[in-house]
Image (cartoon, helix red, strand yellow):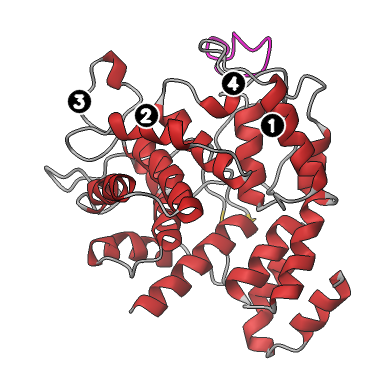
Amino acid sequence: MTSESVNRFYQQQPRGKTEVLDWLLDSDPAIRWQVLHDLARAPSQVVAAERERTATEGWGARLLALQGEDGQWAGGACFPANSRNWRRENQGQPWISTLPTLQTLVDFGIDPHSDRVQNAIDAVNAGCRWEHAGQPFFSGEVEPCINGRVVKIGVYFGQNMDAVVDRLLGEQLEDGGWNCETENGSVRSSFATTLNVLEGLLAHQMATGGSPETVAARLRGEEYLLARGLFRRKSSGEVVNSSWLQFSFPIRWHYDVLRSLDYFRSAGAPPDPRMDDAIRLLQSKRQANGAWVLENTHPGMIYFPLEDGDEQPSRWNTLRALRVLDWCKKGA
C-alpha cells in the first residue's frame, strides 16, 4: 500500500471532516500514520503502509542515521559525552543522547519490526551503558523517572523488562506514586516521576498481560494523579505548577496536563469525573482554526526541530488533543 492509497482514502472523506486532518496529513510519516489510525480510522493496510515509512523516511530515518558506531546517540545513555557543563551554562538539558532519542522514536511509533530498527536496538544492547554505574541500557539505572521511560522503550522494542518493573514496584511510595528523590529521603510523590512510571507499567501490562501486583501498583499510581485532578494540590486545590497547563512536544521527562490525559486515554478506561477540569482546560486551548499551539518547548540541544516553535500551530499537540477528546466523547 503506497502513500497514494493514503491520499485516496482522505479524498473519499467528507470535506468537513478533513479540514484539520488534511493539515495533519501534510507532514511526516510519524504523524501521518497516527492520524490515520487514531483519528481517521483508516483501513489497517493503509495504516500499516504509512507506518512502515517511519523507519525509512523523514524524522525517524534521520534519527536512526545519527546512531554512533558505539550503539549510542551522542556517545551517552542519558547525557551526551562531553556535556558536563550544561547546568552551569544554563543551556537546558541536551536531548541528543540515547534515552531521549529512543523515547522520541517511540513517540513517532516507529515500526519496531523494521530490520533497520532491530539493528539499532541490537547495537544499543551491545554498546550503551548508563552513566550511573555502567549498567546495560535495558537493565535500567536507579531513578524511577528514568526507569519508567526505559520500561516503556524496552517493551516497545521487544525487550524483557520484568526486572526493572519489579524494582519499580518496590519503590512505590505510601501515597501511591513515585519520586526520583526517594533515595535522598523524599516520602512524597512527584507528578512527573509518577507519570513516567505509569507509562512504563501500562506498556508492560499491555505487552505481557501484567500481574495482579503490577496492575494494582498502576491503579494506585493513577489514583495519586486523579485525587489531585491531574494538576492540583490535594490539600488546597491550588495549581501545583503553572507550566503543567502548557502543552509541549517532545515531552521528554516533563509533566503536563495533555500528557497525563493522553496516558489515561491509552489506558482505555472511561474518563474519570475528576479529570473534568483538565478536559475543560484542553478544550479551551483549541484555536479558531481547530488546531492547538505549541506552548512550552523544553530547552536543550536537539538534532532538528519537529515543530515551528512556541505559539505556532502544533501538529503533535493537535493530534494528541483530538484523540483525547475523541476518547472523552466515547466515554461520555
The residue shown at (58%, 14%) is 86
Residue that badge 2 annotates: 167
- Label 2, residues with CA under 10 Å away: few <14, some 14-19, many ≥20: some
* Spatial separation of the CA atoms under disc 2 and disc 1: 31 Å
Amino acid found under the numbered disc labelled 2: Arg
Q: Is residue 289 visible?
A: no
x and y, in percent, of residue 321 in the image: 50, 63
Amino acid found under the numbered disc labelled 4: Pro
The mark lying in front, picked from 4 and 3, is 4
Q: Quadrant of the C terminus?
A: bottom left
Magenta span? 78-92
Q: Secondary structure at mark 3?
A: loop
* Spatial separation of the CA atoms under disc 1 and disc 4: 24 Å
First in residue order: circle 1 vs circle 3: 3
Disc ID at residue 136: 4
Does 10 sit above or below residue 136?
below
Amino acid found under the numbered disc labelled 3: Val
x and y, in percent, of residue 273 in the image: 24, 67
- Label 1, residues with CA under 10 Å away: few <14, some 14-19, many ≥20: some
Residue that badge 1 annotates: 302
x and y, in percent, of residue 250 in the image: 59, 43
Does 271 sit above or below residue 210?
below
The residue shown at (68%, 90%) is 14
Q: Considering depth in this image, is 321 or 241 the residue closer to the camera?
A: 321
Residue that badge 3 annotates: 187
* Spatial separation of the CA atoms under disc 4 and disc 3: 28 Å
First in residue order: circle 1 vs circle 4: 4
Q: Image quadrant of residue 179? A: top left
Amino acid found under the numbered disc labelled 1: Ile
Q: Is residue 120 left or right of residue 332?
A: right
The mark lying in front, picked from 1 and 4, is 4
Q: Is residue 234 magenta?
A: no
